[in-house]
Image: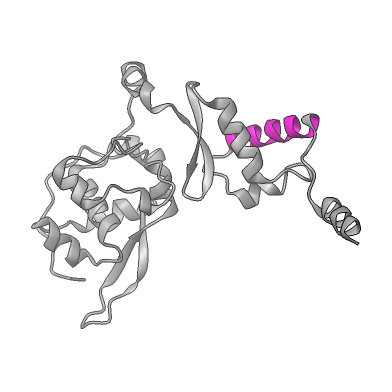
Amino acid sequence: MAEQTETSVAEAAPTAPDAATMAQALRIAEAVIFAADRPVSPQTLATVLPEGVSATMACAALAAAYQGRGVVLAEIGGGYAFRTAADLAPRLTKVVESPRRLPRAAMEALAIIAYHQPCTRGDVEEIRGATLAQTTMESLLELGLVAPRGRREVPGRPTLWGTTPKFLEQFSLKSLADLPRKEELVTGDAPPLPGLNAPIITEEAAEEAPAPSPEPAEEASER
């Protein structure tokens, strides 16, 4: 009886894919992730992989294959994407032209939203100690870095804002839990954050947008 049970368990246990199947899975995963314009989710990747090879298995093997190379496989926002190795950034900046960056006010607002979400524009202004132009919020919204997260149930019902999956992708974060703790930022002990100084690519609008000008005083709406 015991022998029959052991045989049944052995038959039920999944078998590891053979070398040829695994090699094909890596080629497929590499091609899909390379061709995608955003991180590829495990669910999407699983639909094209050979039977018996999971997305997690394929990406783990692919990450190992790229370890130590100029391009590495990173897990970002619940998906997988290729990124240049972080230690090569100083050399890349010498030859790669940086796209347009967000103005300082927009970066400050984005950081506040990331750490205090969901929060209103009034919350952002209170923390910054300065008014926030409507155009600043509109630029973050157009870039897909923030999105509405409902309304606060107070007089006026101001919009609550939070970050998006594209925010995680832009700053190479696996999840919001990877943000440095606020205590570390104050003491200066925060580890380097991949993509923290990365420029924000504004696609077609970036090249056409005028140079940032001083923000006008803003009306007290939506506080």
Q: Position of residue 19 (x, y in %)?
A: 77, 30
Q: Is residue 5 left or right of residue 187?
A: right
Q: Position of residue 80 (x, y in %)?
A: 54, 42
Q: Which residues are magenta?
A: 20-34
Q: Is residue 59 above or below residue 174?
A: above
Residue occupying the point 26% across, 52% down:
110
The C terminus appears in which quarter of the rendering? Answer: bottom left
Q: Quadrant of residue 98?
A: top left
Question: Does the magenta portion include 15?
Answer: no
Farthest front residue in view: 2
Question: Does the magenta portion include 27?
Answer: yes
Q: Is residue 18 left or right of residue 38?
A: right
Q: Main secondary structure of the magenta part?
A: helix
The N terminus appears in which quarter of the rendering? Answer: bottom right
Q: Position of residue 59 (x, y in %)?
A: 61, 38
Q: Is residue 180 left or right of residue 185?
A: right
